[in-house]
Image (cartoon, rainbow, N blue to C red):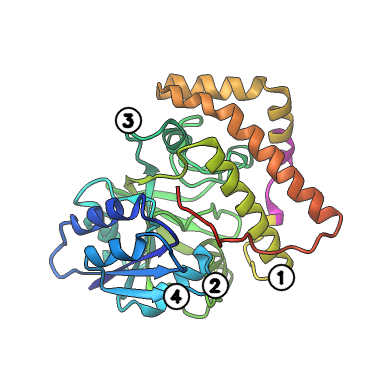
């Protein structure tokens, strides 16, 4: 079995070396081969030099520049029957990560695996630790209950009612259209056959792939492995604001172009309203902060309030732009610098 690590990059010199070092450090299970594929969106820093220094197997071009297009370009250039989607700001936390992530594939029903949590490292910047503790990169997910990593506020890996069977080192999930959290990023490992009959070219939206398979087959089985992954998401609040602006612009553009299939309009409207009210009144956020700190003490929880305020501001302007009929466009990546 060959596992192809697919890594979209764009000016990723700050994190790529550590990402590749962790992949190279993996102890390969018997009968498993490894391939590393970089999909570059036109980096102008040392990204490609670092990739060559680490002897990556394939460097593919990603002319459409987005991370979703990079996944497509990388998968097209990959040769493995198992695809591991790892971003350039992801670090595999230990040498047996790959072995644990591929073990559930011994069950023929399992089409994909994903880490159960984000790994919190004490030496990472406080914002990075905060998002790992929260278990999500967007605080609205906490209020809509649609998240997919262990959350320090709730103590659960999702707020949706997903049928789950504990298999010891991993959880076997039965995902349906009514129970489909936002699975599919930061260490998502899947059989290439999962893509069969789905719309993944030229942009691969991971949650859309699962939704399309569910619509066809009625349900899919995914394993949540009891391990973590490091996500160096943001070192500063300014980085977070920039990424939220990119997120909302890209989402509105692809939604307007009808290139998304996952039913985002089904998001709990009450959850979104609760987020807005909680952010404005502040007290519920302080309560969540206290709960999180009691569960996992870390001063990084202090970022909960400003992160929610930034999200409300950025998404609010995005919603107003849509309301007044502004023509949407993909966020500009010309001067993008990762982290």
Decide which of 224, 8 is in the foreground and name it. 8
In this rendering, position of residue 317 left or right of residue 149: right
Q: Position of residue 258 (x, y in %)?
A: 70, 70
Give the image quarter of residue 286. Answer: top right
Q: Looking at the image, can residue 202 be seen? A: yes
Q: Which residue is mark 3?
A: 122
Mark sitting earlier along the chain (4/3): 4
Tell me, for residue 64, which label it has, or none: 2
What is the total number of numbered labels drawn onto the structure image?
4
Of labels 4 and 1, earlier in sequence is 4
Secondary structure under tag 1 reads loop
Give the Cα distance between marks 4 and 1. Answer: 21 Å
> Local crowd at mark 1 within 10 Å, few (<14), some, or many (≥20)?
few
Q: Earlier in the sequence, mark 3 or mark 2?
A: 2
Task: Check disc 4 and report its element: helix, strand or loop.
Answer: helix
Q: Is residue 163 above or below residue 290?
A: below
- According to the image, label 4 marks what residue? 73
Which picture quadrant has residue 250?
bottom right
Task: Name the residue furthest right.
Answer: 324
Q: In the figure, is residue 4 to the left or right of 177?
A: left
- Residue range in magenta is 265-274
Q: From the viewer's perspective, is the residue at label 3 or at label 2 nearer?
A: 2
Are the residues flagged by discs 4 and 1 in contact, CB closer than 8 Å? no
Q: Secondary structure at mark 3?
A: loop
Task: Give residue 294's mark.
Answer: none
Front disc: 1 or 2: 2
Mark pair 1, 2: CA separation: 15 Å
Query: Mark 1 sits on what residue?
Result: 257
- Circle 2/circle 4 CB separation < 8 Å: yes
């Amino acid at each position: 079995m060959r596992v192809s690590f697919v890594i979209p990059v764009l000016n990723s010199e700050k994190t790529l070396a550590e990402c590749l070092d962790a992949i190279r450090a993996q102890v390969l299970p018997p009968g498993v081969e490894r391939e590393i594929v970089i999909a570059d969106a036109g980096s102008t820093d040392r990204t490609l030099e670092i990739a060559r220094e680490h002897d990556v197997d394939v460097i593919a071009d990603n002319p459409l520049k987005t991370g979703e297009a990079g996944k497509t370009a990388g998968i097209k250039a990959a040769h493995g029957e198992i695809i591991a989607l790892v971003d350039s700001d992801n670090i595999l936390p230990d040498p047996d990560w790959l072995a644990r992530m591929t073990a559930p594939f011994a069950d023929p029903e399992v089409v994909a695996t994903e880490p159960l949590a984000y790994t919190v490292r004490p030496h990472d910047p406080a914002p990075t630790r905060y998002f790992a503790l929260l278990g999500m990169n967007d605080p609205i997910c906490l209020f809509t209950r649609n998240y997919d990593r262990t959350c320090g506020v709730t103590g659960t890996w999702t707020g949706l009612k997903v049928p789950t069977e504990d298999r010891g080192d991993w959880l076997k999930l039965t995902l349906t259209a009514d129970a489909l959290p936002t699975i599919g990023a930061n260490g998502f490992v899947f059989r290439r056959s999962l893509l069969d009959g789905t719309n993944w070219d030229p942009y691969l939206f991971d949650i859309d792939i699962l939704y399309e398979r569910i619509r066809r087959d009625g349900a899919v089985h995914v394993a949540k492995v009891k391990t973590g992954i490091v996500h160096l998401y943001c070192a500063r609040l300014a980085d977070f604001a920039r990424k939220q602006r990119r997120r909302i612009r890209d989402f509105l553009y692809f939604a307007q172009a009808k290139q998304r299939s996952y039913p985002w309009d089904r998001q709990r409207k009450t959850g979104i309203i609760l987020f807005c009210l909680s952010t404005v009144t502040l007290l519920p956020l302080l309560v969540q902060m206290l709960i999180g700190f009691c569960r996992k003490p870390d001063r990084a929880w202090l970022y909960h309030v400003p992160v929610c305020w930034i999200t409300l501001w950025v998404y609010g302007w995005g919603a107003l732009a849509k309301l007044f009929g502004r023509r949407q466009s993909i966020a500009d990546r010309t001067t993008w610098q990762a982290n």
